[in-house]
Amino acid sequence: PRRPVLNWDDPSGAARRVLAAGIIRQVGLLHQPLVGLSVEALWGQDPAPTDASGRLTGGSPEPALSALRALAREVRRYGSWSLLRDRLPARLLPVVQAAGVDFAADTVLSPALEYALISGNAAPLETAIDASLAAGVDHARLWRQSADGAALPLPSEGTAGVTLPDDWNALLVAPQGRLHATAPSLAAVAVGLTPDQARTLRYPAMDGDNADDARMEQMRNMRAAHVLQLAFRALQPGLLLVSGPDLSGALFATENGDLPPAWTPDGSNRTATRQGLPVAVQIYPSLDVQLSEEHSFASELRRLAELRRQTGVAQGRLVARVDMPHPAAAGVLTALPDGDYLLTAGNFSGTSFVTDVNFPPGLIRPDEPGADLVSGRGVAVGRDHLRLRMAPWQYRVVRLAAVGAGQGGRP
């Protein structure tokens, strides 16, 4: 009874057997293609390393890394893929990737992307992307998901220029200074809605006779800010996960807030389920209704899925962050499996602007126009740069030919 269950180095091997049994159950009995792993409880059990003078040089990753190596091998042996749920600093992502985990939680874009949306300042997002490339993070082995209510660290105003209105701050920020929000609630904050306005917002038919012009504009803006959060992730290498709050447009609050932290798959807006559990206010209707609307969130998601399939960006290689002078703009360049490049750019503000996009020299062919994969139009490409017009909360996706490629952009 006094022996710690999760002592990985215990000679009895109890921790290894407990975790291996969970893997066997998920893969062998439940046939899960992805197995979630968490080794947070094992991180730092070994003594921290010291330098020559005896001072601590940082926390030890052991025995967490040893456990990850063993567990990832077991997952693969039984025919599945491992997904590390622990949210580690981006500098540690190459370490856990080297340990054999198939997919690690994306802490490069999150929470930097959420803060860019709230503040309209993409500088922290650009810094995070640059740091990940310098550290050697394999972006194709990250799993990406928009905010789903999980706790995110909220930096001070001086650190990232992030502030929330008082009414939202009371609902979304826990006493420990953690942000608890879904992507739809962050979209509502970004477009300037109050909690009361967000609560009563419902997705109307785009051609509905009773649709109020002002509320339709609010819905369009909120949907655009919501889609941007997913699109910027979807059109980069890696695994994309979509949550229930995304699909239903569920708003979220902390435990003591007025907006309950739950959702219903059918999109109904009941105040309580049959079991007495609260459900969140949901601004989107059920999926079958959404898919009948050309501009609904689910229809936008379907278009993003098709773009991922057509381009193969999930298996691509993130090459560089592109330079976009406007403070609300950020973009990345991905090398696609077929030899082309894909530019993914976003406007994290409610203003329209025209901005240059500057590429690393010697990558993009200047004599062949790019293809805007959303509008289907051509985009003029100069030597190592192009120019984009960005609408509020808009994402742009441009396919570009590589230097040395033949006609059509293929090598």
Image (spheres, rainbow, N blue to C red):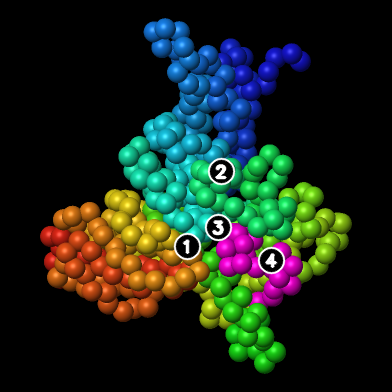
Q: Which residues are magenta?
A: 182-203
Q: Residue at x 42, y 45 (%)?
A: 128
Q: Which residue is mark 2?
A: 155
In the displayed structure image, the side of residue 138 where residue 117 appears, left or right: right
In x, y percent, where is residue 375?
Answer: 37, 78
In the displayed structure image, the side of residue 291 where residue 212 appears, left or right: right
Q: Which mark sits nearer the N-terminus, 3 or 1?
A: 3
User: Which amino acid lies under the numbered mark 1 shown in the image of this protein?
Assistant: Phe
In x, y percent, where is residue 212?
Answer: 67, 85
Identify the secondary structure beneath mark 3: helix
Q: Which mark sits nearer the N-terminus, 1 or 4?
A: 4
User: Which amino acid lies under the numbered mark 2 shown in the image of this protein?
Assistant: Pro
Is residue 31 in sight in this rendering? yes
Identify the secondary structure beneath mark 2: loop
Identify the secondary structure beneath mark 1: loop
Seen in the picture, residue 62 relative to 193 is either above or below; the reply is: above
Q: In the rendered structure, find residue 348 and report the number of the disc placed on it.
A: 1
Q: Which residue is mark 4?
A: 194
In x, y percent, where is residue 238?
Answer: 42, 51
- Cα separation between marks 2 and 3: 12 Å
